[in-house]
Image (cartoon, rainbow, N blue to C red):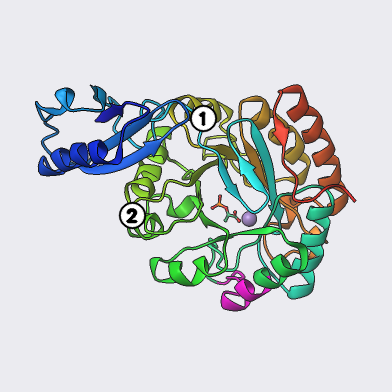
């Protein structure tokens, strides 16, 4: 349920309303939007509306949210959520590109990648230290050493760092390093993991599952928000279909649908969608045209030697070309591309 409060409501009135809601078994989330203050009341199994509510001082109106996701929905918060960390800015007309290798392989590889993506205007460095691989025999990531290298790359370049966590037990460890914590497609419905990152107060990049509906994806985001972590970035990374000419099928419509249903920023990962570096630019531009607030792109200093996802990784030169195209389209869309640093 949404309790829309008067914009100038005092703390005492807010507290009184929350007390009544809590008596009815609700958990309250205070959401201060640009145009209004609302209390998102969730979690009461009976879902009864306390009769006194509408008569209480400061209460403008009480609305039921029809969708199963509540805090995530645009009904709860009509204006876009803008997520800022370091130089990353996503949502509300701001676009950022997060780029880097699939996996952290060595200090040299990571620092080179970081310098290159920074040079062309990425706002953050991505790189996996814990890698979810289909084969147990494939490179699993450098783990703690990988996290250390990510910290070194951040010191060196000033770029914010995005990295994945796979195991609820590692959330604290990964959060010591990551500016943005990534939940991979395979873990989109790992509910203990979602609950754990819901306890953080740090942005979470939530990838859509390989075969998840938009509703399931938004419900996964609801798990994180219901823990009190409101900084969720949705990421469309392609879904599994009958088509075999691409690694996955980029669901462009899901970007537009998620933007309509939710106030959260939505970004796209054209690298895992297409699975081929030649497809990255067209898929990236299509995503932005459909309303994406940013991109997650794999870039490797030498894709041919990559230990993970080389065929879909851009080399630095191709990343530069992508960024030039992105810059043009973002301007055409009337949005602002936020770069890590000004071009050198
Ligand atoms: C990744 O970003 O490297 C990754 C493993 O992505 P996904 O979870 O989308 O497959
Ligand atoms: Mn990858």
| Residue 156 % position (x, y) | 77, 68
Magenta stretch holds residue 143: yes
Q: Is mark 2 within 8 Å of ligand 1?
A: no
Q: State the image coordinates of residue 343 (x, y, percent, origin top left).
A: 87, 47
Given residues 340 and 212, the one toward you in this image is 340
**Marks 2/1: CA distance?**
22 Å
Indicate left or right for 123 with 205 as reference. right
Label 1: which secondary element: helix
Q: Residue at x 44, y 31 (%)?
A: 262
Q: Nearer the viewer, residue 115 or 238?
A: 115
Is 310 placed above or below 242 here? below
Magenta range: 137-149
Residue under the image location 48 percent in, 28 percent down: 79
Q: Residue at x 48, y 24 (%)?
A: 260
61 lies left or right of 186: left
Per the image, the residue denoted by label 2 is 191
Q: Which residue is mark 1?
A: 254
Quick one: quadrant of the N terminus?
top left
Give how far across and how far down residue 261 sits, in percent: 43, 27
Left or right: residue 341 compared with residue 142: right
């Amino acid at each position: 349920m949404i309790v829309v409060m008067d914009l100038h409501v005092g703390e005492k009135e807010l507290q009184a309303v929350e007390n009544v809601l809590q008596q009815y078994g609700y958990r309250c989330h205070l959401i201060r939007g640009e145009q209004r203050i609302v209390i998102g009341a969730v979690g009461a199994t009976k879902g009864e509306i306390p009769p006194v509510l509408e008569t209480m001082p400061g209460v403008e109106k009480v609305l039921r949210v029809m969708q199963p996701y509540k805090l995530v929905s645009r009904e709860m918060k009509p204006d876009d959520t803008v997520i800022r960390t370091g130089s990353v800015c996503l949502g509300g007309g701001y676009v950022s590109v997060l780029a880097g290798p699939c996996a952290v392989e060595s200090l040299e590889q990571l620092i080179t990648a970081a310098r290159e993506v920074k040079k062309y205007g990425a706002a953050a460095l991505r790189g996996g230290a814990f890698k979810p691989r289909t084969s147990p025999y494939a490179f699993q990531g450098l783990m703690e050493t990988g996290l250390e290298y990510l910290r070194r790359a951040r010191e060196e370049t000033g770029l914010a760092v995005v990295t994945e966590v796979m195991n609820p037990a590692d959330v604290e460890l990964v959060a010591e390093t990551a500016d943005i914590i990534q939940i991979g497609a395979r873990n989109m419905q790992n509910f203990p993991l979602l609950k754990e990152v819901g306890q953080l107060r740090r942005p979470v990049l939530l990838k859509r599952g390989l075969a998840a509906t938009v509703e399931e994806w938004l419900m996964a985001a609801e798990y994180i928000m219901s823990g009190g972590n409101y900084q969720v970035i949705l990421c469309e990374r392609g879904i599994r279909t009958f088509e075999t000419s691409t690694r996955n099928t980029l669901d462009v419509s899901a970007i537009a649908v998620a933007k309509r249903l939710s106030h959260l920023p939505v970004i796209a990962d054209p690298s895992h969608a297409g699975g081929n570096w030649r497809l990255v630019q067209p898929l990236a531009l299509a995503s932005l045209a459909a309303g994406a607030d940013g991109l997650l792109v794999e870039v490797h200093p030498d894709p041919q030697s990559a230990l993970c996802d080389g065929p879909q990784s851009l080399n630095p030169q191709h990343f530069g070309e992508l960024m030039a195209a992105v810059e043009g389209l973002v301007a055409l869309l009337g949005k602002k591309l936020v770069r890590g640093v000004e071009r050198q």
